[in-house]
Image (cartoon, coloured by chain):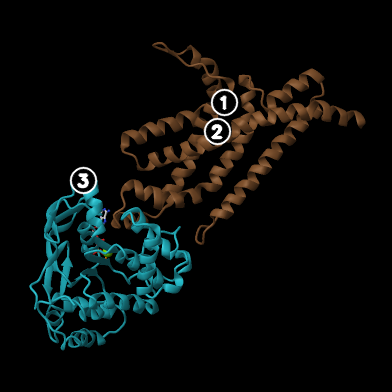
Amino acid sequence: MTTPQPILRVEGIHKTLGDQLVLNDVSLTVNRGEVKILIGPSGSGKSTLLQCLNFLHHPDQGRIWLDGREFKATSRRELCAFRQQVGMIFQDFNLFDHLTALGNVQIALIKVKGMAKAKATHRAKEELARVGLADKMDLYPAQLSGGQKQRVSMARALAMDPKVLLLDEPTSALDPELIGEVLAVIRFLASAGMTMIMATHQIAFSATMAHEFLFMEKGRIVERGSPVHLLAPGATSRTMAFCAKINELSGDLGMAERRCASSSSALADKPQGGHGTT
Amino acid sequence: MNDYWHFFLNDVFPALNQGLWISIAVIVPSALLGLALGVLVGSLRVYAPAPVRLLNEVYVSLFRGTPLVVQLFFWYFALPHLQIGDLRIVLSPMSAAILGFTLCSGAYHSEYIRGALLSIRHGQIKAAQALGMSKTQTVLWVVLPQAMRRALPGCGNEIIYLIKYSSLASIITLNELTGIGRTIAKQTWRNIEVFVALGLYYLLLVTLATLLLQYIERRLALPGFSHARR
Ligand SMILES: Nc1ncnc2c1ncn2[C@@H]1O[C@H](COP(=O)(O)OP(=O)(O)OP(=O)(O)O)[C@@H](O)[C@H]1O
Ligand SMILES: [Mg+2]
């Protein structure tokens, strides 16, 4: 086992939006190759936290380290350099509407990384092929399904070679039948050793690959631990209770407990503890 | 009948054709400079820091809030009387007209551009920034290409207006279409024929401009960007 190598570490993040303290002293560390899952009720601050991690929101207080170096948002140039290394996937995709799938993936390579156009095209095609969209390159966002749009946005983020990928409810805006194709990409990335922090309500799915669940409530991380522990049959964790509630809401009254339990039993053969990269 | 043809062929058309070129020499630069100014001012009104934004707001209200004729009089007749140190600016009728039309249409274009910029979903700006784009890069490569498409119908209409209000240049002694038309009418006393012909010249210019704008719109059309022109 390799020693854990912290990629992104934050300490004591505070953020006030309007007159509300949305993040209250949040700290977390994600090591290379780890997947951390943020869960919690609506309004608990998951999106705000993820946006603080790449300075789309500037934290009011707190420190951030990326790959061992503390980052202080002192100049705009540094800020742009920092953001290139932290990929972000949004709930509603946020593709550039005037560009084709290829153009969406290409543009930052050319304009931000200064890559030659031919090279950027080549790279963008590779990334699109990786998410299964080799045949959709020339389509515009208006011509793509939600699942395809989200996969383009993942190709766009991955093309920048980020050190860590932040995903904010990547499947919440999708029709149920389209969720699978996006989850498949996420699972592939996890197995390839991509470091990720994901806010999601797909608890059963994320339990199969998460190294840690972070349960947020009112701007704080109130519970953290491996899914095996938090979702063990009979566990009394907040996570378990929340999971049961989600399943209830989605109509599986009674099934809820069993589903949460089964999502953790699926983990039984998965090694826990310090994970090395693949 | 023969007399009419004679009059048109020998007097009206040759003179108006001359005026036509002068009109075009005013309209084309005013349209291009006005649009460029409108894009700049519109972007600043949305994205610049507060003091710059305010300055641009003042410009727009000033030029939208005063009659164009008064603006033209100012550039042509009043400006030479303003002496700052040793500097005194005297503009030719042509320069005064281009300056006046550019500043006026720039103010209107900026309205359309501003509205279009505000209609771009904020999520795309966030996505651009998350990829490491600077603010300027975001505006240049993400926001403006979309905003221009949205603003095109409005800006196109403004250019059509410009073609028509370019006739005001005649009152600062520029011999463009309208100026020449008035001169021939005065000399020949054949007001009906001259002014009908003059109207047709403008109609022709507007029709050509409309076709050109439609062509540009078609060329720039993209899936997901619907146009509600007319
Ligand atoms: N721009 C803003 N101004 C003021 N308050 C805000 C702003 N953005 C978010 N908030 C508030 O901050 C709190 C946290 O919002 P956030 O979007 O981070 O929650 P979330 O956990 O992502 O919720 P969800 O599951 O609904 O996405 C909410 O109470 C929200 O009302
Ligand atoms: Mg959210």
Provide the residue designation for mark 1. B97
Rendered view: A185 above or below B153: below
Above or below, A14 against A90 in this view is above
- Image location of residue A57, percent across then percent down: 23, 53
- Image quadrant of residue B68? top right
Task: Name the residue beneath numbered marker 3.
Answer: A75
The image position of residue A262, as x and y in percent, is 21, 88
Residue B30 has which mark?
Answer: 2
Circle 2: element type: helix
- Chain A is shown in which shade? cyan
Q: Are marks 3 and 2 on the same chain?
A: no
Q: Earlier in the sequence, mark 2 or mark 1?
A: 2
Q: Are marks 2 and 1 in contact (CB under 8 Å)?
A: yes
Placement of B200 over or under B212, stated as above or below? above
Q: Colour of chain B?
A: brown
Q: Viewer-proximal residue, A22 or A210?
A: A210
Residue displayed at 30% across by 57% down: B131
The residue shown at (17%, 66%) is A217
Q: CA distance from mark 1 to mark 3?
A: 45 Å
Separation (CA) of disc 3 from disc 2: 39 Å
Location of ligand 2 given as a quarter of the image? bottom left
Using the image, name the chain to which the residue with label 3 belongs. A
Tell me the amino acid under the disc marked 2. Answer: Ser
Chain identifier of the residue bearing label 1 in the image: B
In terms of secondary structure, where does tag 3 sit?
Answer: loop
Q: Is residue A83 left or right of residue A131?
A: left
